[in-house]
Image (cartoon, helix red, strand yellow):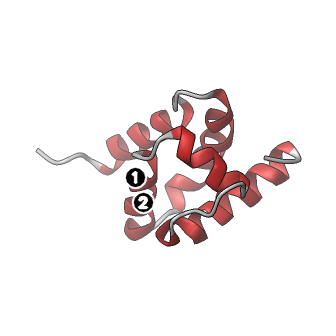
Amino acid sequence: MSETQDARLKRMRMRSWRRGTKEMDLILGPWADEKLATMDAAALELYDLLLEENDQDLYPWVSGAQPCPPQYLELLTEISAFAKARHGRV
């Protein structure tokens, strides 16, 4: 049985808020709350793949400490800008 759209968004929101590191919870959680419902299917698929990545990799990518994989560059640039506007810095 396939996952309903509502169930998928709920799962993705929960995974955004419960990452394993507080830093990534505070970066991805608010972004997911605001953006997931308006994302198209391709963007949701990419974000779902991003959620599979380890926080130890994600944080340096989103903070700009390390270059991120090209497939995530646009998405992580958006997430980073959102977090910086919200928190003042990442």
Which residue is depicted at the point 74% across and 55% down?
82
Q: Residue at x 66, y 54 (%)?
A: 62
- Local secondary structure at mark 2: helix
Residue at the disc numbered 1: 48
The kind of residue on which mark 1 rests is Asp
Instruction: Provide the secondary structure element on which disc 1 rests.
Output: helix
| 77, above or below 11, in the image | below
Q: How many C-alpha atoms fall within 10 Å of the one at disc 2: few (<14), some, or many (≥20)?
A: some
Q: Mark 1 and mark 2 in contact? Answer it, CB < 8 Å.
A: yes
Which amino acid type corresponds to the residue marked 2 in the rendered image? Leu
Residue that appears at 56% across and 39% down: 56
Looking at the rendered image, the quarter that the N terminus falls into is: top left
19 vs 58, nearest the viewer: 58
Cα–Cα span, label 1 and label 2 = 6 Å
Count of numbered badges drawn on the protein: 2
Say which quarter of the image contains residue 75.
bottom right
Describe residue 38's horizontal placement relative to residue 2 as left or right.
right
Please state which of the two labelled residues, at mark 1 or mark 2, is closer to the viewer: 1
Residue 13 in the image: x percent, y percent?
A: 49, 40
Q: Residue at x 47, y 33 (%)?
A: 14
Q: Residue 37 carries which label?
A: none
Residue 42, picture quadrant? bottom left
How packed mark 1 is, by other alpha carbons closer than 10 Å (few <14, some 14-19, many 20 or more), is some
The image's mark for residue 44 is: 2
Left or right of residue 22, residue 88 in this image: right
Vertical relation: 78 (above or below) 33 = below
Q: Position of residue 9 (x, y in %)?
A: 42, 46
Q: Where residue 24 appears, x then y in whole percent?
A: 62, 38
Residue furthest to the front in view is 66
The x and y percentages for residue 80 are 71, 56
**Relative side of 47 to 57, left or right:** left
Front position in the image: 68 or 9: 68
